[in-house]
Image (tube, grey):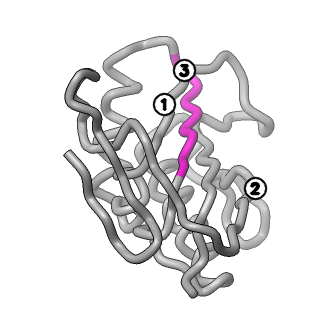
Amino acid sequence: MTETTRRITRINPERLHPTPGYHHITVVEAGRTAHLAGQCPLDEAGTLVGEGDVGAQIDQVAANALEALKAVGARPEDVVRSVIYVRSADQAVLAGAWERLTRSVLGGAFTSASTLLGVAQLGFTGQLVEVDLTVALPG
């Protein structure tokens, strides 16, 4: 299956396993890219949102990432690579994080090449989730 929009082509080769919404390969024609720093569940004052609540933290991360995309004139559909870090080894928690992110205001970002990782620790005390995005900037 291949999906092409503007300069971005997303591909799922027939001989690779099916995915829950992302594509195995994302190809970007020459152009400018933006590499967003990992977006954390912090409010405008730098205070952690949703202590102990992965859902609330995902919502804050999605909102922060959307603001960062807007700052460079991009939309979630312009994301060409995502890495999602969740502080958990529980597969159900990881799957739930994926589901919530794909239904969030940032949902369109997760149709490209994506990696979901369960990790032991993130940068801020109490932080449960972080999202790292690479964006093909609109022409």
Residue placed most toward the observer, 28 or 87: 28
Dot 2, crowdedness within 10 Å: few (<14), some or many (≥20)? few
* 127 versus 132 height, above or below: above
Q: Among all residues in the image, which is located at the extreme front?
A: 30
Q: Are marks 3 and 1 in contact (CB under 8 Å)?
A: yes
The residues tagged by marks 3 and 1 sit, at their Cα atoms, a distance apart of 7 Å
Q: Hey, what amino acid is under mark 2?
A: Ala
Residue topped by disc 2:
37
Residue topped by disc 3:
118
Q: Are marks 2 and 1 in contact (CB under 8 Å)?
A: no
Q: Position of residue 101 (x, y in %)?
A: 38, 50
Is 72 magenta? The answer is no
Q: In the image, 83: left or right of 97? A: right
Which residues, given as a range, are shown in magenta? 81-88
Residue 136: which numbered mark, if any? none
Q: Hey, what amino acid is under mark 1?
A: Leu
Residue topped by disc 1:
116
